[in-house]
Image (tube, rainbow, N blue to C red):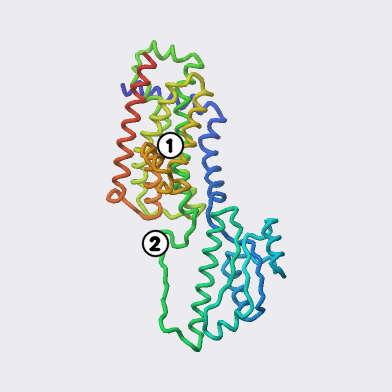
Amino acid sequence: MFERIKQLVIKEFIQTFRNKKMIVFLFVVPVVMLIMFGYVATMDVNSVSTAFYDLDQSYESRELARRLEASGYFDIRHRPGSPQEIKELIDRGKALCAIQINNGFSKDIKRGIATQIQVIVDGTDSNTAMIAMNYVNIVTAQYSLVLTKQSVRPTISKIDFRPRVWYNPDLKSRNYYIPGVVALLIMLTCLMLTSMAVVREREEGTMEQLMVTPIKPMDLMLGKTIPFAIVGFFNMTLITLVGVFWFAVPIKGAFIFLFLCTAVYLLSVLGIGLFISTISKTQQQAMMASTFFFQPAILLSGFASPIENMPEIFQYITYLNPLRYFLVIVRGIFLKGSGIETLWPQVLALLILGVAIMTLSALRFKKRLS
């Protein structure tokens, strides 16, 4: 049995690597996609185009403007002279944020009474708008604390606000997204390759030749999945190295644990690919079916938006998505250094799901060959 599987694995590797385009797809495309995701898929907002409308023209208002620019979050490109000019700048997309300082800003500060500033944000991109508003709050809160310490009229009570961020102290969204990209690319490559493996044999007319040999259906199934499992492990290692050494994403957990969890994850991915191969008649159909599965899997995984924000019915559907569990695992290993004592519920769920999917796919595979 082992000799038959070994020969099938060798045959599959030779058949796969004979196509130079396939080599590019396996080893170059994942790295290129990771680099693109690393630079493009980020929620960080820097150098927000800002209009600063200063009606007070005082030292305090200019100091606030200086602090906004020094934070690196805001780029004050415009100094409008009227509210109408602010409207035109935002309407034309030249400014995302406008900050207005009213008359009496400096006097109110010196008298120790509360003062106000107006922040106008373009809400077309709601996420960017919310982040920009939070940045304004952070900078003004810090400036307010400095003014409170300098005031000759100290307040009766003072709140010393000292936030501490765990696991991702710099709040870099890249550290959050790149581990998720590892999970996505493993699914994409292994799903595509496995789904087309059996179909390719039928299209090329070699399936009949395999059927007249002593090879059993289980041998053929293992011979078709093991090579792509090896490819999945290689891609995981390659992408992880690029993420750690190129993007400086920390990996605080044990790499061997990540390796073992990837093996459990591949059970589901290869099982789904194998199932798709049994319901497809051509490689084109297999590729379309893989794409049809892959895109909803991303949306229902929590990769970009929290699962808790989804409608309740879709939250239940996510329990059938292996990507949901592996994202929690890979992010926990990378950012928190979590181990089996913390991630065992996700590993167990992924194992149960993987065994169920692989069993169903194996039964379908045998039925298709019979």
Residue at 44% x, 15% y is 207
Please state the horizontal and vertical placement of residue 345, each as a whole percent of the image: 29, 45
Name which quarter of the figure residue 259 lies in. top left
Residue at 52% x, 40% y is 30
Please state the horizontal and vertical placement of residue 221, each as a whole percent of the image: 37, 23
For residue 6, above or below residue 261: above
Identify the amino acid type marked 1. Gly
Q: Are marks 1 and 2 in contact (CB under 8 Å)?
A: no
Q: 313 and 349: which one is in front?
A: 313
Please state the horizontal and vertical placement of residue 305, each as a whole percent of the image: 46, 48
Which residue does the numbered mark 2 point to in the structure image?
166
Q: Secondary structure at mark 2?
A: loop
Task: Please identify the quadrant where the C terminus is shown.
Answer: top left
Which residue does the numbered mark 1 point to in the structure image?
232
Q: 36 and 254: which one is in front?
A: 36
Left or right: where does residue 342 sit relative to residue 242?
left
For residue 176, above or below residue 216: below
Identify the amino acid type marked 2. Trp
Q: Secondary structure at mark 1?
A: helix
Q: Residue furthest bottom?
A: 152
Q: Give the number of the disc on residue 251.
A: none
Q: Residue furthest top?
A: 212
Q: 155 and 292: which one is in front?
A: 155
User: Which is more N-terminal, label 2 or label 1?
Assistant: 2
Please state the horizontal and vertical placement of residue 53, each as a whole percent of the image: 66, 70
Residue at 51% x, 77% y is 144
Residue at 56% x, 74% y is 116
Task: Please identify the quadrant where the N terminus is shown.
Answer: top left
Left or right: where does residue 63 sit relative to residue 185?
right
